Image (cartoon, rainbow, N blue to C red):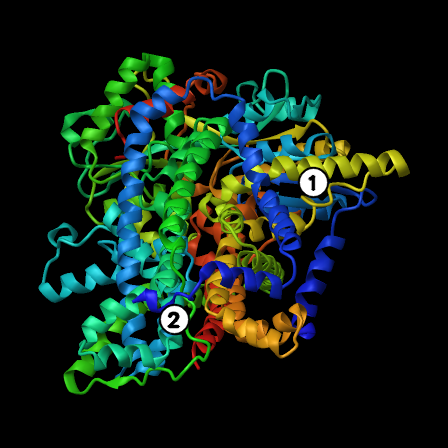
Amino acid sequence: MTDLLEPADPVAEAAAVKSRLGPGWPWLAASFAVALLVLAPVAGLVVFASRGSGGLWPHLLQNVLPVAVRTTVLLLAGVGLSVAVIGVGAAWLVAMFRFPGRRILEVALILPLAVPTYIAAYAYLDVTHPVGPVQTFLRGLLGISDPRGLWFPEIRSLGGAIFLLAFVLYPYVYLPVRALFLMQSASMLEVSRTLGAGPWRSFRTVALPLARPALVVGVSLAMLEALNDIGASEFLGVRTLTVAIYTTWVTRSSIEGAAQIALFMLAIVFVLILVEHRARRSRRYAGPAGRGRAPAPRRLAGWRGLAAALLLSLPVLLGFVVPASYLVLSAVRRVGTRGLPADLGSWIANSVGLAAIAALVAVAVGLVLAYTVRVVRGPLAPFLVRVASVGYALPGTVLAAGLLVPLASLDNLIANAVRSWTGVSPGLLLTGSGAALVFAYVLRFLAVSAGGLEAGLARISPSIDMAARSLGAGPLKTVGRIHLPMLSPALAAAGLLVFVDCMKELPATLLLRPFNFETLATHVYGEAARGTYEDGAVAALAIVLAGLVPVALLARTGRR
Amino acid sequence: MTRLLAGPLLAFGAFCAAVPTALAQEVNVYTTREPGLIQPLLDTFSTETGIKVNTIFVKEGLAERVAAEGENSPADLFNVVDYGNLIELVDRGLTQPVQSEVLTASIPQNLRDPDNQWFALSIRARVAYVSKDRVSDETLTYEDFADPKWKGKVCIRSGQHPYNTSLIAALIAKDGAEAAETWLSGVKENLARKPGGGDRDVARDILAGLCDIGIGNSYYVGLMRSGAGGEEQKPWGEAIRVILPTFKDGKGTHVNVSGAAIAKNAPNLDNAKKLLEFLASDEAQHIYAKANFEYPVKPGIEADPIIAALGPLTIDPLPLTVVAKNRKQASELVDKVGFDE
């Protein structure tokens, strides 16, 4: 089916694009510079790793890595599969059918995105604990008095971690796939129907293959997030590779060994990305020039409509309502006894300000990368984009530690130069200000913006460029007047996703922030580390609420 | 769009401008202790001396950050939990010795570095939480946790947590690695659930009947029973009885410390010394005891009543510097017996 979308002659087509958007080398040079910057923390890790880990590997190979690799593979497979099923299923139902509550569910399904995984883990342990509300209620119902008398699934397990991560991370799939289903012109699905395919067959043979780029981007984001997660995994006792890195660093005081495991993990991720990319390279996904009508949703009547509504409420309930109501209750208790934390305003300002700047930068840089892919022929450009996306595959703390080396070297260079000039040391400008944080955020989340923008740009058919050109528009005008407006949903989505991710970001913030600089996430963490969850609940709720605004906006960008 | 940009840009400008200048009276603290814990101490110091305290709360990577910052590092004082972190900072050459009669007079010799590179400021004991209803034992040794009579009844947080590797390292120092490994396997056999969560989850799981005995830090008992960590934690604290265990040699209870060291390149050396001396003062030691339910290091300062009620603490005499040498091996034993699997 995808063959229908292939341009007549891909080579000539690409050459034509190149000439229309000006020469490729400035784009390539810019992308190359970005890739180099992204590799800065990796270089830092290489520096650490090359110091040698003092004979740590025999132990790691024998006692740590076999378990860690197996656990990680199972976790990623479980999360990947679950988010694909939940995300695609929800997107298909919402985009193609009408049923009671659809308009609310369409938006509500994005909400779990605002919940940081570590907060969801705290909440779920509390809620599902034998002395927590759910089990207490069930026992009361069944007349069991002994807390051990009721069997209940244990959240502190691999299965529990998969469950938790899947229901918090599925929006990474739901969002882009839904957007894609909505953008597919109805004609394709109608063609398949007139050719006699039922809804299920249309889904399998037309819609799903078309959604593949979005599905791949979404699933890989969710899997990478699960891979680099430390808060939830450690708390739930799941020994992933990331936990092994962390333990090697903290407990064995070996940043060298930690860097080596991290690089090993990175290498595997990179190979997987390349394999996927090769498999996808031969296909193109641009739709016909006109966007066409949206497919008209079919009405699901009676019990089927009700069933659809109930089914779609489940991810919202488990991924958002449960942790959010836990936070609301805790926050209310805290505010009732001690009022609002005095510094709440400054935490919000710091979090929002930092996240907004990082999101803007990430979108701008992502746009450069995406355009390079469009303008420059050959495998080099997509390769650079993949390189620029590796930040997402690294655990945040490790990325931050790797970043310290190049960043502080630069800082010292500047400080010493200024001192030898003026006699006064200006202090460390990058690590001493928020600049290091913005840099770290952009590196971490560039994959989110670049991936989304690349997919968005790929859907704008080259024939539109040709039309613009033949009507006398130069490259700049084509970008400014045609591409950017058409791309605005993708731009908004990319920016908002990065924003939400930055709001939730914790490990890099902890390590790289300047003096007296508290964000919502660092405050929550400080209280949780102390065990005073209730004191952190107000700030945790603020993270979720601040995330709701962009999430609501995201919901609008997907609509026609 | 420009208006959208203006807010964040202003905020960014503001915190770039907030980079500390060298002119004001101030002191820069890098801390792995949670801000909520030490803020009362620092506020009191600022009020009394007029010296502004700037803090960064870092979790892991404090040593990496300071090492990378090098000679221009703004750090004056490190305030960290776990003696392993203190020793690591010293070993990496990131600290400097302090000669202070105030400190040597306030802090017992076994709780500071022989070369005055670091000073302990508070003590926490690794104690046994046992069920009030289901356990009648009056005393316990750490070795008892491997006794088969507790099969399926023991709860503990991850074996890799520094509090636990420290305990295992002490056992290695006393009885050798082989005995420690046998002990660790025995405890693993007795576990009621996978190691995970925090120390307080041990108390909660005892309340729930998941387990009967467990290991946790002393100050959590104060946090739970006082309701400082939230009202819902009170019943957790009330469900347990606390026993201060010893090793089977009977010499004392295993403890860990929080402490501080002065940075090698401290730009505000005098103020750092003032702050360190303040933290060892009666007033600050009292806050340590009150706000976080830790044992003060300074002789004569009383622990909080909740903690004092746990009974007199006899500290195991094995020096922490000796225990520290076995930490890496302890961590490897945890992996080897698959303690956390």
Three-letter amino acid code of the residue under disc 1:
Asn
Identify the residue shown where x is 60% and y is 58%: A368
Marks 2 and 1, how far apart in space?
Answer: 52 Å
Residue assigned mark 2: A180
Q: Say if B120 sits above or below A340 in the image.
A: above
Badge 1 sits on which subunit? Answer: B
Identify the residue shown where x is 73% and y is 32%: B266
The picture places residue A122, in percent across and down from the top left corner, at 36, 54
**Would residue B169 be seen by someone viewing this image from the given angle?**
no
Q: Is residue A498 left or right of residue B75?
A: left
Mark 2 element type: helix
Identify the residue shown where x is 79% and y is 43%: B25
Mark 1 element type: strand
Residue assigned mark 1: B28
Within 10 Å of the Cα at label 1, are there few (<14), some (14-19), or many (20+) other Cα atoms?
many
| Corner quadrant of residue A207 | bottom left
Badge 2 sits on which subunit? Answer: A
Q: Nearer the viewer, residue A301 or B230?
A: A301
The picture places residue B108, in percent across and down from the top left corner, at 56, 22
Three-letter amino acid code of the residue under disc 2:
Leu
Within 10 Å of the Cα at label 2, are there few (<14), some (14-19), or many (20+) other Cα atoms?
many
| Corner quadrant of residue A560 | bottom left
The picture places residue A459, in percent across and down from the top left corner, at 46, 68
Q: Nearer the viewer, residue B320 or B297?
A: B320
**Would residue A37 be seen by someone viewing this image from the given angle?**
yes
Q: Nearer the viewer, residue B68 or B131?
A: B68
Q: Is residue B239 left or right of residue A506?
A: left
Give the quarter of the figure containing the N terminus of chain B.
bottom right
Identify the residue shown where x is 26% and y is 29%: B338
Q: How many marks?
A: 2
